[in-house]
Amino acid sequence: MKNIFIFGYYGFDNLGDEAILLSIIKQIKNSREKFELTALVKEDANAKAKYGINTVSRKSIFRIIDIIKKSDIIISGGGSILQDVTSSRSLMYYLAIILISKMLNKKVMFYANGFGPINKAHNRMIATCIINKVDVIAVRDYKSKELMQSMGIKNNILVTADATFAMELLKENEAKNLIEEVAFDENKKAIGISVRQWKNLKNYKETVAKMGDYLSKLNYQIVFIPMQHPSDVEISKEISAMMENESVVLEKKYAPNELISIMGNLEMLIGMRLHSLIFAAISGVPMVGIEYDPKIKSFLDDFEQLSAGDVESLEFISFCTVVENTLHHRDEIIEKLSDKKRNMKAKVANNFNLLVQLAQDG
């Protein structure tokens, strides 16, 4: 039996990263291959029961090294953890795990990661040096591949799909019971808004609130959908309070597959976080993205969905134009999303196939 150590931004109540880890676990456990899994998490106390695998706290450095020593394969488990926009410290933390793994002669795989941006020159140099030691690199989009290549990463870089597209969805009766708990207005179609804090900016919050009021006047119910607790709940409440009309904020913590089922009842989603858009795509719900990071633009382009523009210069009139366009062409977009989702499911299977091949090679 092979031992696998999976590292990423897990245990921080970010539904995107939680969805990635749960999907990777599902892919591996549902296969005929026998692997023993351990994941890096924020806290260790309740994580083992939550994920159904062994876990280690990201603060337990010596235990992490011991687990790496006992592992056969180290997986960088999706997400855009290799970037220095939020901090150089986290970038160096994850690069150190990769470097230690290679120093201990372990095989390392990127399991459909996003990548970048890495803006500081010395960070780019260090990242390039270390990533060139990685055995298998699978990224979730072509922009990540292009950025890696532009930095001088010479490995064969494969483009697959975000692991979340392998998410195990709720059964029909479970989804029905869940929807009954949500405060959807039976007399209105619902539009979801999923936002996050960004650089202490205020203008985009006012523009989103104005959009919420505009859609409310068109008789849509506005439902704010947080993707990370508690930060997204706080900004959702803040924007909701700016609106003249009533809206709903989903404050409860939902599992990723639960939130995907909830999104399936939306007319469309306006999303800022990448996985709010991915969840919408899985649900077959048309979307409009707000760009705070290049990965948002990359995803929207891949799925042929519209962008409202950059969060730092979000403008109401152009925002209205893309929202109205999306609502007007909703049926066509749903059909397009169905085709794209099938394609992603086929690609996401390649992640596990690459893992199996890596395990068999040694």
Image (cartoon, rainbow, N blue to C red):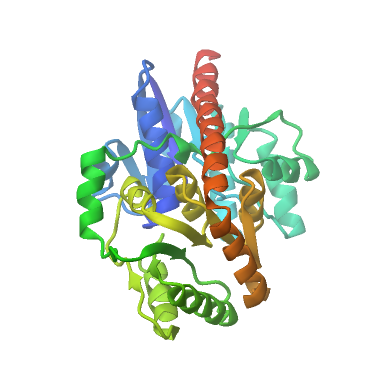
Looking at the rendering, which quadrant does residue 192 occupy? Answer: bottom left
Q: Is residue 324 left or right of residue 1?
A: right
- Residue 272 is situated, as x and y percent measured from the top left of the image, at 53, 62
Image quadrant in which the N terminus is located: top left
- Residue 362 is situated, as x and y percent measured from the top left of the image, at 53, 14
Q: Is residue 254 left or right of residue 131?
A: left
Q: Residue at x 50, y 34 (%)?
A: 75
Which of these two is toward me, 83 or 218?
218
Q: Residue at x 34, y 24 (%)?
A: 30
Q: Is residue 58 above or below residue 205?
A: above
Which of these two is toward me, 246 or 47?
246
Looking at the rendering, which quadrant does residue 100 occupy? Answer: top right
- Residue 108 is situated, as x and y percent measured from the top left of the image, at 56, 31
Q: Is residue 84 visible?
A: no
Q: Residue at x 29, y 66 (%)?
A: 185
Q: Is residue 300 visible?
A: yes
